[in-house]
Protein backbone atom coordinates (compact mmCIF):
# COMPACT_ATOMS: atom_id res chain seq x y z
CA UNK A 1 0.00 0.00 0.00
CA UNK A 2 1.10 3.54 -0.72
CA UNK A 3 0.72 6.18 1.97
CA UNK A 4 -2.11 8.65 1.45
CA UNK A 5 -1.09 12.26 0.86
CA UNK A 6 -3.45 15.02 1.89
CA UNK A 7 -1.59 18.01 0.45
CA UNK A 8 -2.32 20.69 -2.10
CA UNK A 9 -0.97 23.70 -3.94
CA UNK A 10 -3.02 26.85 -4.26
CA UNK A 11 -2.35 30.16 -5.97
CA UNK A 12 -4.10 33.44 -5.20
CA UNK A 13 -3.90 37.18 -5.85
CA UNK A 14 -4.87 40.12 -3.63
CA UNK A 15 -7.08 41.64 -6.35
CA UNK A 16 -8.74 40.79 -9.65
CA UNK A 17 -7.38 43.93 -11.38
CA UNK A 18 -4.20 45.96 -10.87
CA UNK A 19 -3.38 49.48 -12.02
CA UNK A 20 0.11 50.97 -12.47
CA UNK A 21 1.33 54.45 -13.36
CA UNK A 22 2.92 55.00 -16.78
CA UNK A 23 6.61 54.12 -16.60
CA UNK A 24 6.14 52.12 -13.37
CA UNK A 25 7.17 48.45 -13.37
CA UNK A 26 4.05 46.27 -13.22
CA UNK A 27 4.77 43.70 -10.51
CA UNK A 28 2.02 41.48 -9.16
CA UNK A 29 2.62 39.27 -6.13
CA UNK A 30 1.38 35.72 -6.73
CA UNK A 31 0.68 34.04 -3.41
CA UNK A 32 1.40 30.32 -3.33
CA UNK A 33 0.60 27.81 -0.63
CA UNK A 34 2.29 24.43 -0.95
CA UNK A 35 1.37 21.98 1.82
CA UNK A 36 3.57 19.20 0.43
CA UNK A 37 6.69 18.69 2.51
CA UNK A 38 8.94 19.55 -0.43
CA UNK A 39 9.37 22.01 -3.28
CA UNK A 40 7.34 21.05 -6.35
CA UNK A 41 9.00 21.22 -9.76
CA UNK A 42 7.00 21.99 -12.85
CA UNK A 43 6.46 24.16 -15.88
CA UNK A 44 4.66 27.49 -15.78
CA UNK A 45 2.89 28.38 -19.01
CA UNK A 46 1.32 31.79 -19.40
CA UNK A 47 -0.33 33.78 -22.14
CA UNK A 48 -0.30 37.58 -22.07
CA UNK A 49 -2.84 39.44 -24.20
CA UNK A 50 -1.75 43.07 -24.63
CA UNK A 51 -3.89 45.96 -25.87
CA UNK A 52 -2.14 49.33 -26.30
CA UNK A 53 -3.68 52.70 -27.15
CA UNK A 54 -1.64 55.78 -28.00
CA UNK A 55 -2.91 58.93 -29.69
CA UNK A 56 -5.82 57.26 -31.43
CA UNK A 57 -3.71 54.30 -32.60
CA UNK A 58 -4.46 50.93 -31.03
CA UNK A 59 -2.91 47.52 -31.44
CA UNK A 60 -3.01 44.17 -29.71
CA UNK A 61 -0.70 41.20 -29.42
CA UNK A 62 -0.60 37.81 -27.76
CA UNK A 63 2.49 36.11 -26.36
CA UNK A 64 2.69 32.63 -24.83
CA UNK A 65 5.74 31.46 -22.88
CA UNK A 66 6.74 28.43 -20.82
CA UNK A 67 9.53 28.07 -18.30
CA UNK A 68 10.65 25.81 -15.48
CA UNK A 69 9.02 26.91 -12.25
CA UNK A 70 9.53 25.69 -8.68
CA UNK A 71 6.82 26.13 -6.08
CA UNK A 72 8.57 26.34 -2.71
CA UNK A 73 7.06 24.42 0.21
CA UNK A 74 5.04 26.54 2.61
CA UNK A 75 3.54 29.95 1.92
CA UNK A 76 5.38 32.30 -0.45
CA UNK A 77 4.87 35.58 -2.29
CA UNK A 78 6.23 35.19 -5.83
CA UNK A 79 6.81 38.45 -7.76
CA UNK A 80 5.53 38.35 -11.34
CA UNK A 81 6.88 41.26 -13.43
CA UNK A 82 5.12 42.41 -16.59
CA UNK A 83 7.56 45.22 -17.39
CA UNK A 84 6.88 48.92 -17.90
CA UNK A 85 5.07 51.00 -20.48
CA UNK A 86 4.96 54.67 -21.37
CA UNK A 87 1.64 54.11 -23.21
CA UNK A 88 -1.67 53.14 -21.63
CA UNK A 89 -2.29 49.41 -22.01
CA UNK A 90 -4.37 46.54 -20.76
CA UNK A 91 -2.81 43.15 -20.07
CA UNK A 92 -4.83 40.00 -19.56
CA UNK A 93 -2.86 37.01 -18.24
CA UNK A 94 -3.85 33.33 -18.24
CA UNK A 95 -1.52 30.85 -16.59
CA UNK A 96 -1.17 27.16 -15.76
CA UNK A 97 1.34 25.16 -13.75
CA UNK A 98 2.06 21.59 -14.78
CA UNK A 99 3.67 19.45 -12.09
CA UNK A 100 6.52 17.04 -12.82
Image (cartoon, rainbow, N blue to C red):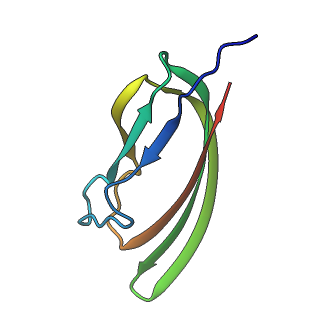
**Closer-to-camera residue (67/73):** 73
Q: Quadrant for residue 26, please give it.
A: bottom left
Q: x and y percent of residue 99 in the render? A: 65, 30
Q: Quadrant for residue 31, please give it.
A: top left
Residue at 34% of width from left, 55% of height from top? 84
Residue 20 vertical placement versus 56 (above, below): above
Q: Is residue 22 left or right of residue 34?
A: left
Residue at 46% of width from left, 27% of height from top? 35
Residue at 26% of width from left, 60% of height from top? 23
Residue 70 vertical placement versus 87 (above, below): above
Quarter that holds the N terminus: top right
**Closer-to-camera residue (77/49):** 77
Q: x and y percent of residue 65 in the render? A: 62, 44
* Number of numbered markers: 0
Looking at this rendering, what residue extends furthest in the right direction?
1
Q: x and y percent of residue 50 in the render? A: 52, 66
Residue 50 vertical placement versus 68 (above, below): below
Looking at this rendering, what residue extends furthest in the front direction?
1
Residue at 64% of width from left, 51% of height from top? 64
**Closer-to-camera residue (78/36):** 36
Looking at this rendering, what residue extends furthest in the top direction?
1
Q: x and y percent of residue 52 in the render? A: 46, 73
Quarter that holds the C terminus: top right
Amino acid sequence: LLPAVNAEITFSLDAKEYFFALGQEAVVMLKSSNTYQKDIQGTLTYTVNQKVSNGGVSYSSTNTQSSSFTIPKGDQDIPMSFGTSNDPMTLTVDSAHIYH
